[in-house]
Image (cartoon, rainbow, N blue to C red):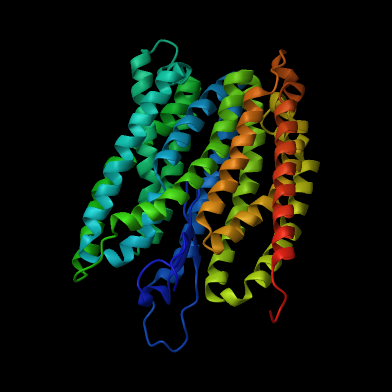
Amino acid sequence: MATTPLRLAGSPSAQRGGFVIAELPTQPIVFALPGAAGDGTKSTGQAGGGAAMSISSALGALAGLASWLIAARLLPQAEVGLAAAVVSAFILIAGITQLNLGLGLMRWLPVAGCHAPPLVWRSLLLIMPLAGLVGLGYVLAVPELARTAAGVDGSLSVGVCLFTLAAAGWGAFVVHDYILVAIGKPWWCVWRNGLFAVVRITLLVVLGTALGAQGVVLSWVGPIVVWIAVGSVVLLVAVRRYGRKACGGIMPGRSEVVGFLGPTAAAQMGYTLLLNQVPLVVILRFGPEIGAAFFVAWQATVVLETAATYYTHSLTAIWARAPERAAELASSARRRLLVIFLPLLAVGALLAGPGLSVFGAGYAAAADVLRLLLLGQAFRLIVVHELGVRTASGRGMAYARLHLTSTFLVLVTVLFVPVAGGAPDDAATAALPVAVGYVVVQLVMAAHVVVVRLRGHSRAPAPGH
């Protein structure tokens, strides 16, 4: 099988019952592939990896929604905005500094054999210090984040340490999932993430009530540190056992590592910036009250964005098995994507007001903002589909360019739209320029994709030539 930025991981025997995994900001996505009939091999249990990781991802999404809903009911809107800024920031740092090594480990671990332990620990010992260092620089540049983490009477240095620990820990936390799936322990991810969600929400209720925004931050930082400490020990044992079962193995060469991580890491950085930096900039520019309302509305679009991305990644697995049907598969995937998600976006727009009112009156004021974001998401479906096509066809640099261009334009819009003053209840009008800018950017990017696709079709040779 040809090597592409997203390919079947592992040896040929593993691939017969293996999986394809695609990079996302916080969770890997796994798609089970049916084993070849009559190959005479036994199931390795990896066919259940897709179900395990789907459940794990769903748990994470539901826990995130539940935690912010609880925070909105427990805390003033400004406190929610301050906490959301800190959480978005350290997730942003962690996502950028993972360098897409999680997906790389998914490619390399199945054939690493006895080299698996050093491969895992070299990766983690690169990610954690890098995430901590970048997190330290970020929080020093934006000290408001440290003040929130430290609390009203806390030392700024304490807040800096908490933020740095969260960034370093979350970077490793996510990569642990990739490693567990790669060594054949996908269901451990379900239990790990499920227990993490329960503990974090419990701490949120206890600490958020007493400490406000700082309590929300601590409900993240505490479990992250504990899970990394305990999980690293468990992972050490599991990876060693995995390595001992193999004789020999292949370590990826430097050129292979750089060639794979280069374009895919750049694309991951762009995607992480889009999902996490945008609400952070809005909170810092427009204030915590308006920022909190925008953050909740933005999360609704993130859920649909993630679901659409999950869907298009299934194209990679089908394309790999039938590359001669590439055009047909791409067209079919685009049609199904629009049929599934356009009605969901329409329903979301209709229910924007009642849905946000669950969080409180201050959040319901951003209903028009949410409707505009969903309109922008409708145009973005064209971009998401094109990203899926470029992934499936192995065009890593083209994939990265499209991702980074879209992210850059959205961030420029958010950074330079005018800030209108007003009370928290004015969130509906104060954040409207951001939402309008998002719609314009997605319309431009969708038009660009359509034009490029039409040019490609016009230049394609006719059948038989």
Q: Point out the residue furthest to the top here.
A: 153
- Residue 372 sits in quarter: top right
Q: How many marks?
A: 0
Task: Give the percent coordinates (x, y) of residue 323.
Answer: 57, 74
Task: Give the percent coordinates (x, y) of residue 243.
Answer: 22, 63
Front residue of 213/268: it is 268
Front residue of 3/206: it is 3
Q: Residue at x 72, y 25 (%)?
A: 361
- For residue 27, say whether it is visible: yes
Front residue of 133/267: it is 267
Q: Is residue 329 above or below residue 194?
A: below
Q: Residue at x 40, y 60 (%)?
A: 187
* On-image quarter of the C terminus: bottom right
**Left-right relation of 77 to 162:** right
- For residue 234, say whether it is visible: no
Front residue of 125/260: it is 260
Q: Is residue 454 above or below residue 300?
A: below
- Residue 322 sits in quarter: bottom right
* On-image quarter of the N terminus: bottom left
Task: Give the percent coordinates (x, y) of residue 44.
Answer: 36, 74
Task: Give the percent coordinates (x, y) of residue 399.
Answer: 56, 52
Q: Residue at x 34, y 16 (%)?
A: 157
